[in-house]
Image (spheres, rainbow, N blue to C red):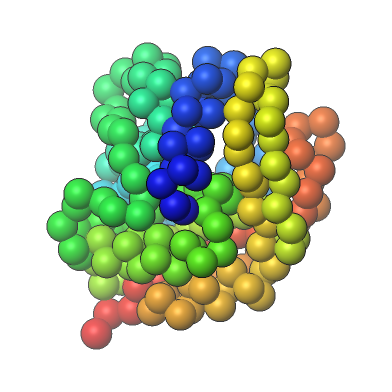
Amino acid sequence: MHDGTHENVQTSYDRVADEYALRIAGELDHKPLDRQLLEAFADRVRAIGPVCDLGCGPGHVTAYLHARGVPVTGTDLSPAMVEVARRRNPGIEFAQGDMRARPVASNSLGGIVAFYSVIHLARPDVVAALSEMHRVLRPGGLLLLSFHIGDHTLHLDEWWGRPVSLDFTFFRADEMTGYVETTGFRILERVEREPYPDVEHPSRRAYLLAEKPAP
């Protein structure tokens, strides 16, 4: 993500933060597979260490994990989105930050959730972002990653009546699996599903559960 794209993503989400929260914050109620995967992740990661929800948006995934006893914080590139998350989820820590460079010590996190967090990265930037996730996870730490399946990029100039400049990158499942393995993770599970009608963008979705192997 070069600086111009970085600024576009931040500015665009600042502009739609309130509307995004209104439309998206309740989406897990209508996504049973997502809930199932998050619950399984919570059961596994609870004993490993604290979790960061990268690209947390309004904090609904963060809150879902928090309600299941996971020590979790949320991070988002958009300051406005972070403020929305704080208002909606008092008692949970949220911070503004860039997934490509985390101010977190190496080997300090037990888990990372990155639901659709890499979709605004250009392909050449994905491995660097995943390498940073690998750095901050403890040996045995877990990454739960989701993305849209495809091989194209969708550009938006307008979103819910507001001007934006956003590129949504779609990845082939084998392609993203390769990126994750290249950065040192071991894939534990890969799940694909069709979109939930009238709930989300009509694209196939993929979820990867990966582990940072112990030495």
Q: Is residue 142 visible?
A: no
Looking at this view, name the residue that lies furthest to the bottom. 215
Numbered-mark total: 0
Q: Position of residue 130 (x, y in %)?
A: 41, 64
Residue pictured at 69% horizontal, 19% vertical: 160
Considering depth in this image, is 154 or 17 the residue closer to the camera? 154
Compared with 188, 55 (above or below) is above
Asked where in the image residue 47 lies, by quadrant, the reply is bottom left
Asked where in the image residue 45 lies, by quadrant, the reply is bottom left
Residue pictured at 64% horizontal, 47% vertical: 168
Asked where in the image residue 166 lies, by quadrant, the reply is top right
Q: Position of residue 28 (x, y in %)?
A: 61, 34
Q: Position of residue 9 (x, y in %)?
A: 50, 37
Compared with 189, 11 (above or below) is above
Considering depth in this image, is 3 or 129 the residue closer to the camera? 3
Q: Is residue 50 visible?
A: yes
Residue pictured at 45% horizontal, 69% vertical: 127
Residue pictured at 34% horizontal, 45% vertical: 98
204 vs 178, left or right, is: right
Looking at this view, name the residue that lies furthest to the left. 105
Q: Position of residue 21 (x, y in %)?
A: 55, 21
Quarter in which the C terminus is drawn: bottom left
Considering depth in this image, is 110 or 67 the residue closer to the camera? 110
